[in-house]
Amino acid sequence: MRLALLGTGTMGAGMARAMHRAGLDVTVWNRTPAKAEPLAGEGIEVADSVTAAVTGADAVVTMLFDTGAVLGVTDEITAALGPDTVWLQSSTVGIHGIQRIAEKASGAPLLDAPVLGTKKPAEDGNLVALVSGPDDLIDRARPVLEAVATKTVVAGPKIGQASALKLACNAWILSITAATAQSVALATRLGLPGELFLGAIDGGPANSPYAQLKARAMLAGDFTASFGLDGGRKDLDLITEAAWEAGVGTALLDGVRAVFDAAAAKGHGEDDIAAVYTALSGD
Ligand SMILES: NC(=O)c1ccc[n+]([C@@H]2O[C@H](COP(=O)([O-])OP(=O)(O)OC[C@H]3O[C@@H](n4cnc5c(N)ncnc54)[C@H](OP(=O)(O)O)[C@@H]3O)[C@@H](O)[C@H]2O)c1
């Protein structure tokens, strides 16, 4: 299967490697060519245009920053798509975003296919794929989904359903990251080693491997980006808009957004979401 992956950022580069390891014939394109170049030495073809990457591909994956980035390449993708190609739109674009992309790509064989997981799971092919769209397209996309994910959750037959599930999942991830920062800051400022909080929840029903991972990064002050803080703020906008439109209260989201914004104002926008700790630690 020949696959074109557009966007070799934190997630896309790892996904391209996982797809290549799974035996797919992978061509990538990135807006900034230098960021795709390292993949060329690993047996992955680097194309110099969207058209060159997509032409002749059986499947196309978009893994770009936001809706605007995907809309910016949509015409070029649709012009180069073959009759049996399937397009998996995996960037986090929210419910309105995927609808706008579907409208612009009208008639294209599009799947709403966001993913859960960060840099390491992407590299390891251990993401969770969320997908919605017509069954026949999902079947055609299976080799791609199996290459990048250990589990695929089918959210329904309609474009937008997988993005809705992705928003619910990211509300959870961003909220527990902020909650972890709050508890680590509390323990530390109350004169305890932050590790005591981790040890106390470990093994109990309130434990979370994600909280353990992010708390260790907070305590070490290691904010190397796996899930960039500005990306988290972009997602909080999408989640808050969806919650507001659905009549879901946004008080918790507003608080999470406030601490993410405060960390960005301290210069941590390009760091990992663990840097939200800097907004609460009192340092
Ligand atoms: N990181 C995570 O943990 C995670 C997990 C699940 C889903 N996601 C979602 O996956 C997507 C990619 O995330 P990421 O962490 O890989 O982000 P990233 O490292 O910031 O990479 C963003 C990618 O989008 C490209 N891009 C940005 N604006 C563009 C534009 N206007 N036109 C064309 N290309 C553009 C960038 O190209 P350049 O190199 O030229 O800037 C880069 O390839 C986002 O929608 C994110 O929300 C992220």
Image (cartoon, grey):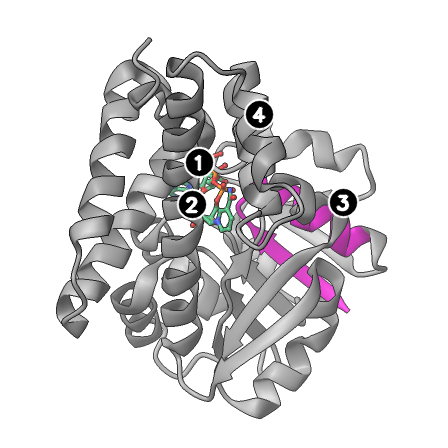
Q: Which mark is residue 196?
A: 4
Q: Earlier in the sequence, mark 2 or mark 4?
A: 2
Q: Which mark is residue 44?
A: 3
From the image, tell me which residue sits under label 2: 176
Q: Which mark is residue 180?
A: 1
Q: Earlier in the sequence, mark 1 or mark 3?
A: 3
Left/right of residue 46 with respect to residue 6 in the rendered view: right
In this view of the protein, can residue 132 be seen by the observer?
yes
Magenta region, residue range = 1-20
Magenta run includes residue 217:
no
Left/right of residue 252 with respect to residue 26 in the rendered view: left
Mark 1 and mark 2 residues within 8 Å of each other at the beta carbon: yes
> Which secondary structure, mark 1?
helix
Mark 2 and mark 4 residues within 8 Å of each other at the beta carbon: no
State how far apart marks 3 and 2 are (Cα).
Answer: 36 Å
Q: Most extreme residue toward the top, as rendered?
A: 283
In this view of the protein, can residue 222 be seen by the observer?
no
Q: Earlier in the sequence, mark 4 or mark 3?
A: 3
Quadrant housing the C terminus: top left
